[in-house]
Image: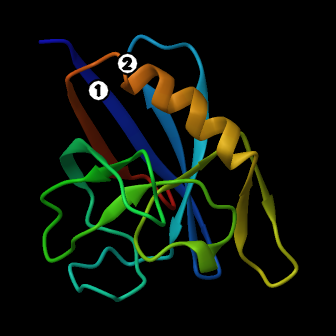
């Protein structure tokens, strides 16, 4: 079974957003990730980022989010997806990758080129059967 480790290191907070850096073991490239602001939350529907930890990824598909991945076994939360999106309004705990980031006039981060980043990441994930993501908080360090 081919295993793959993904790491999301949360590095900055601004307004109601958290910015992280996503890396994949054995891959030289990295991406940014936009999540809701903190603190970490186990409350469903809280529109806060999920609790830092190690989680399994499973493929997930719905009418709204076809062909994405779900972060499984998140304490108190369900349907935490990795999907395309640029702004904090596009997420309720989900992780949205981008190739670049920016700061909006309303004092929030956003990610840019999210669909392209998602394609790059998913093309790597798709070659593996056992995928885990480890999320760590390094905000303010």
Residue in view at x 18 percent, y 63 percent: 74
**Vertical order, 18 against 26 (above or below):** below
Residue count near mark 1 (Cα–Cα under 10 Å), binned few <14, some 14–19, many ≥20: some
Element under disc 1: strand
**Vertical order, 127 against 51 (above or below):** above
Percent x, y of residue 45: 33, 88
Marks 1 and 2 close (CB-CB < 8 Å) = yes
Residue in view at x 38 percent, y 26 percent: 125
Label 1, label 2: how far apart the Cα atoms are:
6 Å
> Could you tell which of marks 1 and 2 lies nearer the N-terminus?
1
Q: Determine which residue is flagged by label 1.
A: 5
89 relative position to 94: left or right: right
Residue in view at x 40 percent, y 80 percent: 48
Element under disc 2: loop
Q: Determine which residue is flagged by label 2.
A: 25
68 relative position to 1: left or right: right
- Which residue is farthest front? 63
138 relative position to 52: left or right: right
Percent x, y of residue 14: 65, 73
30 relative position to 66: left or right: right
Percent x, y of residue 116: 69, 37
Percent x, y of residue 104: 83, 73
Which sits in the foreground, 107 or 95? 95
């Amino acid at each position: 079974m081919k295993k793959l480790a993904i790491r999301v290191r949360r590095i900055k907070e601004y307004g109601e957003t958290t910015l992280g850096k996503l890396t994949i073991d054995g891959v030289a490239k990295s991406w940014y990730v936009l999540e809701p602001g903190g603190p970490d939350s186990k409350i469903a529907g809280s529109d806060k980022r999920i609790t830092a930890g190690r989680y399994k990824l499973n493929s997930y598909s719905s009418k709204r989010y076809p062909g994405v991945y779900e972060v499984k076994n998140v304490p108190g939360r369900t349907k935490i997806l990795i999907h395309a999106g640029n702004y904090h309004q596009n997420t309720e705990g989900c992780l949205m990758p981008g190739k670049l980031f920016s700061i909006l006039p309303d004092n929030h981060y956003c990610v840019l080129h999210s669909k392209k980043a998602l394609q790059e990441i998913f093309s790597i994930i798709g070659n593996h059967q056992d995928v885990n993501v480890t999320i760590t908080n390094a905000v303010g360090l």
